[in-house]
Image: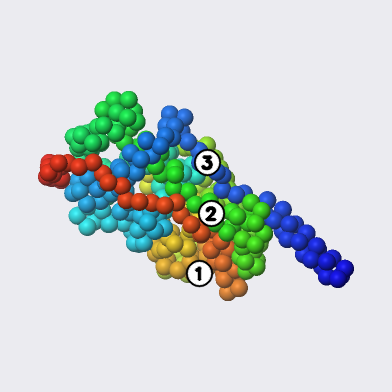
Amino acid sequence: MKRITSILVAGALGGFAGVAAAQQWPAMPEEPPTPEDNPTTEAKVELGKKLYFDPRISSTGTVSCNTCHNVMEGGDDGRRTSMGVHGETGPRNAPTVWNAAFLSVQFWDGRADTLEDQAAGPIVNPVEMGMPDHAFTAERIGGIEGYREEFKEVFGSEEVNIERMTKAIGAYERTLLTPDTPYNNYVNGDEDAMTDKQLRGMETFKEVGCTSCHSGPAFAGPQMPLGTGFFQKFPTFEDNQYVEKYDLMEDTGRHAATGNESHKHMWRVPTLYNVELTAPYFHNGAVNSLDEAVRLMGKTQLNKELSDQQVEDIVAFMGALTANSFPDQELPRVPSMSGKSSVLEYRP
């Protein structure tokens, strides 16, 4: 009996030691960074949620924020590149909105400093939502009495403008967090939260060099001040079969937004939370499977041919970043136009 007790105690201590070692890995913070000029309130979040789901902020009344960043699923749209108004598709894959609040810049090329800045962009993109300008968008939403009442409650007056609209949307998006993952539960002290295979994959993930980019609270690089992006060149190593096979060089990344030659093929590092749910992968959505994405990253970023076992283990670890549960999302009832159609007021 004494020997059995000793074994049990040793096993328990070993488990706690494993959890302690895991504390070198950061857990997702309880709260995301928030701009000083946009404090979160319950009423603002509710208004932002309605705007997020309302397709009337698009020219045809058919595309909402949720169309491309579906919070009922992985926070993206499952398409190679997203479809906007008139069935047109853009050049890049839609990033997930889940946990985007932890990113210090937005869009693949980091051209938006905050969630608020990001929310303003697609509205006037001719391929995405197709509105002629932000003033027209605000006029359309401001023409709806129910919205004017909510803007007054949140901001103190009925004035509707793009700044207020995007502040509300940003406030809602900061609630889209998924801390309930096996990984987070493990590093927070639950030694049974991850499987042995996931733990082995966690070690492999570190050993092969994945953490050189995918670290920090969202596995998207170190937490940096809002507006200061964490970028990496992709592909770093170009002499391999993946570059041509998946057309990785056509889009010049951050360079396309800045025109700076040193920014060619520089990209904001994406989060790995819920990555199992967000295929297809990469900025052009060219890779359909997570296994292949891991192999590609090993070769293009680390110049390593990963073994089948390494790939399998890393994919298992990535599964530990998938949420056990997501915050409940109910479709909001948006304010009515009372029999009028705002869509007919604009023809692109």
Residue 247 visible in the shown view: no
* Kind of residue at badge 2: Asp
Question: On the image, numbered disc 3 is attached to which residue?
Answer: 31
Question: On the image, numbered disc 1 is attached to which residue?
Answer: 291
Q: Which mark is residue 180?
A: 2
Question: Which mark sits nearer the N-terminus, 1 or 2?
Answer: 2
Up the image or down, 285 lies above or below 23; here it is below
Q: Report the number of numbered marks.
A: 3
Q: Position of residue 125 (x, y in %)?
A: 27, 45
Q: CA distance from mark 1 to mark 2?
A: 24 Å
Q: Position of residue 61 (x, y in %)?
A: 20, 48
Please identify, in this view, whether the residue under mark 1 or under mark 3 is nearer the observer.
3
Q: Report the front residue among 192 and 161.
A: 192
Please identify, in this view, whether the residue under mark 1 or under mark 2 is nearer the observer.
2
Q: Position of residue 309 (x, y in %)?
A: 60, 73
* Residue at 51% from the left image edge and 41% from the top image edge: 32
Q: Position of residue 296 (x, y in %)?
A: 50, 65
